[in-house]
Amino acid sequence: MRFEASPLQVVVALLVLAFLLAFLVVPVARVFVAAFAAPEGGFTLIHFADFFRTSLFIESFWNSAYVAAMSVVVASLIAVPLAVILARHRFPGAALINTLGVLPLVMPPFVGAVAMQLVFGRNGTVNLLLMDWFDLRLPLMEGLNGVVFVQALHYFPFILMNLTASLSNIDVSMEEAGQNLGARGFTLLRTVVLPLALPGYLAGASLVFVKVFDDLATPLLLNVTNMLAPQAYLRVTSVGLNDPTGYVISVILMVVSVAAMVGAALLMRGRDYATQQRGGGGLARRPLSRIGMLLAWCFVVPVLVLVLAPHIGILLLSLATIWSYSPLPDDFTLAHYGTVLVSTPQFLTNTLLYCGAAGLIDVVLGVAIAWLVLRTKLPGRKLLDLAAMSALAVPGLVLGIGILRTYFDVELPDGTSLATSGLMLALVYAVRRLPYALRAATAALQQVHRSLEEAAENLGAGKATTLLRIVVPLMAGGLAAAFVTSFATAAVELSATLVLAARDTSAPLSYGIYVYMQSPAGRGPGAALGVIAVVTVAICTFAAHRIAERERARRSRGGTSA
Amino acid sequence: MTIPGVEIEHVSFGYGATRVLEDVSLSIRKGEFFAFLGPSGSGKTTLLRLIAGFGMPDSGRIRINGRDATREPPWARSVGLVFQNYALWPHMTVAKNVAFGLERRGVGRAERERRVKAALELVGLAHLMDRRPAQLSGGQQQRVAIARTLAIEPEVLLLDEPLSNLDAGLRAGVRAELVELQRRLGLTTILVTHDQEEANAAADRMAVLNEGRVLQVGAPAELYDRPANRFVAGFLGTANLIEGELGADGFRAGGVALPVMAGPPGRAVLALRPQAITLRRDGGGMLPARVLRAEFLGTHVRYTLEAGQGLRLTAEEPHLRGLDPLPPGTPVGLAIDPAQATLLRA
């Protein structure tokens, strides 16, 4: 076997490898080392023993597990009926359900959390009205309940999307065979349809579990600190970088996350039911009966109200003069927008700068790795792909703590730490979003038929010219979508940001929202920033969606690019 | 002696343990229309790609117009390859596609525009310059691909299965145009195909490849009439391949003797084209046989016959009105012209 690699390929691969080592592998490894290292050096389990001897930590562990599991349950209660209605029935409100599936995602849960408190909290709109009318109070936002409520409402679209996709991939003949053998109605749903859709449900549910289990920002904003992620954050920020507990919790977070994902993958193994036949149709959509239609509307409309509540709440809060102990604000003003634009414009410009840089880094790295994997025979190229994808398994909090541990002592020329600089935030955002950008770049490059490059080489273009004139223009749509997605999701990342952002002057938008929300007076400007974040994410999501649609249309029009 | 257009000297190539080409040597004359013919997996496309510079032979050399091009990268060769799927860039107009190679060669703007126009006129598509590839039919896309290649005035033109993506009804016409264009330009051209009719009709000479080896080289009729081995005899047209023993009284197989030209005695294979067997309805001829099956094909009827002990033969009878196909079981006589039979080594 010849060693087939040009110097260019080797250089590119080494640069990518250096980036992944420096900002992903080494920081995470440092966290593990710190969790298992004895004070006098050497391996020890003493920190873990300490952890399990402390009642607060045990309680936090079970609380995190409970919140994650309950969030899956509540999210399922919302998502499963919606998915069944959407995939199996002719429902005039289908477009509404599709909208329901996107609305929560454009609002970061920590922004939603504050608004939810105003609407559903102890002294929120709903409870004030209930008190007035029925002398009744619902503890929707009390303690862990609040976290479950906010998280379930934010993450149910993951289950909805995965389940709808796998429901619509079931071939109509599967159902017809069941009917032919005598099953109908709920029996058919239970014995044929739902088992076939199980892999999609599991994929969505495990994702929700992991995201909730690892989340730092939402519990922190709701003032719930007896959970794992907040405990790790508090230990590292208050006790200090040398306290081993933060690292122990980080390791536990990672192990549970990876175990949940691996567990779901094992459960799904051998259950990849691709039943769609060539020329076959998806699941038959049948009309709803009058009762069914009524029930469907009675379910969809309240869910819509719930989903819209945080959006409306945050908008009202951003426009409110005072909103306290009353169902609605007393009066309205635009002053909060003025405040955030005039007195703290750096939150916005920093976000533009860091997230723009992160998006660019992701596109460049994504293209480089995709190119190495698909277009070269470089030994070990698959490992680069794997290393980049492994960022998915690393919670933002853990990566943040690892970066602090690794780079806190590295001083920049101005005397501040590299770990808490804006540059580092951009790099961390890039690492966290790289898996998505990499998959997008890989898909885009796969769409470019090899012969399109060979034709250019045949006509006299070298590798570099071919890349610039042929490959990159043909990938442009996919890359633009990847950039926009990276940018938008990085703009509302808070877990790693909370750990790394040190000063208001160099902090981004998400940190700004958190800081403002800490004081009653800051809630208005915080909400204004939140609205700006939601609008930004919504526009970016819409743009990415449109670009992807246009690409699909261009490809299906023919030509040899497919 | 003139320098060959393309000379392939003892080229071998493989991916890991898989051997794709084994010691291939070929000499393609300047201005010749040459064809690589073989089934899929025979290595013909790999050989074409090596000539274009996509991949480097494990051993051996490739010369283009006398120059050793083995180690030249694809972009440094002047070898125009027309891809099977045309590989037109969907983000460029027809004119941009055609101009690309000229830009790479630093041809000035005015000259470039003139040559783009000339190349497109050559294929009759100058009026579609500003279209995108997706707005063209399959046949038009192919012409653009050819124009894009011809615009750089290559030393050699390579055509990879050029007709396979066209509707069956278009193929004969496009093939004739290709040949006409090649004659007019006098360009050394290599066509890769698995379709013997395509190779027969277009090529001056051709090489039959199988399992990475060149089995025979020659003009189409020469290969058809005098196949060098069983594979070539069976791959080019239909042939009866009869295993038997060559002796003093002729070729013995299945308990009967067939008339052949003399050859060295021993085991041998007799290749016999269906049209070399004359079917006599009156029972004349020297070999009695029985009809097993008749296939009516319009211009002729193809019979599967049995002679002697289980010797199966395929013969063809020209069809005319009034000459109904014979039902199974009908006894007939066969006449075989020894001059049409080819003896192959077993």
Image (cartoon, coloured by chain):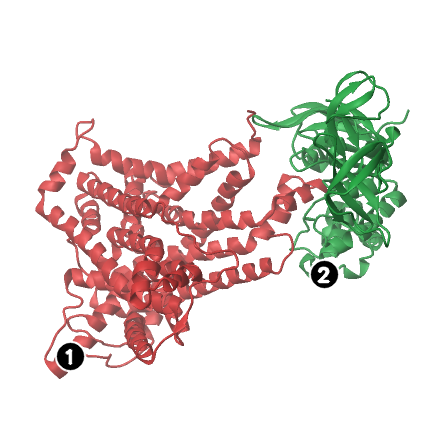
Mark 1–mark 2 Cα distance, whole angstroms, equals 67 Å
Residue marked by disc 2: B131
Residue type highlighted by circle 2: Arg
Which sits in the foreground, A323 or A297? Answer: A297
Asked if B175 appears above or below A90 in the picture, the reply is: above
Labelled disc at residue B284: none
Residue type highlighted by circle 1: Leu
Subunit bearing disc 2: B
Query: How far across and how far down the image is residue A402, in percent?
Result: 29, 41
Asked if labels 2 and 1 touch by Cβ distance under 8 angstroms, the answer is no
Query: How far across and how far down the image is residue A343, in percent?
Result: 34, 65
Label 1 packing within 10 angstroms: few (<14), some (14-19), many (20+): some
In this image, B254 relative to A511: left or right? right
Query: How far across and how far down the image is residue A505, in percent?
Result: 33, 55
In this image, B114 relative to A192: left or right? right
Asked if B160 appears above or below B92 in the picture, the reply is: above
Which sits in the foreground, A210 or A178? Answer: A178
In this image, B258 relative to B90: left or right? right
Which sits in the foreground, B44 or A95? Answer: B44
Label 2 packing within 10 angstroms: few (<14), some (14-19), many (20+): some
Query: How far across and how far down the image is residue A508, in percent?
Result: 35, 56
Residue furthest toward the bottom? A133
Asked if A74 appears above or below B68 in the picture, the reply is: below
Which sits in the foreground, A320 or A146? Answer: A146
Residue marked by disc 1: A130
Quadrant in the rendering for residue B183:
top right
* Chain with green colouring: B
Q: Colour of chain A?
A: red
Subunit bearing disc 1: A
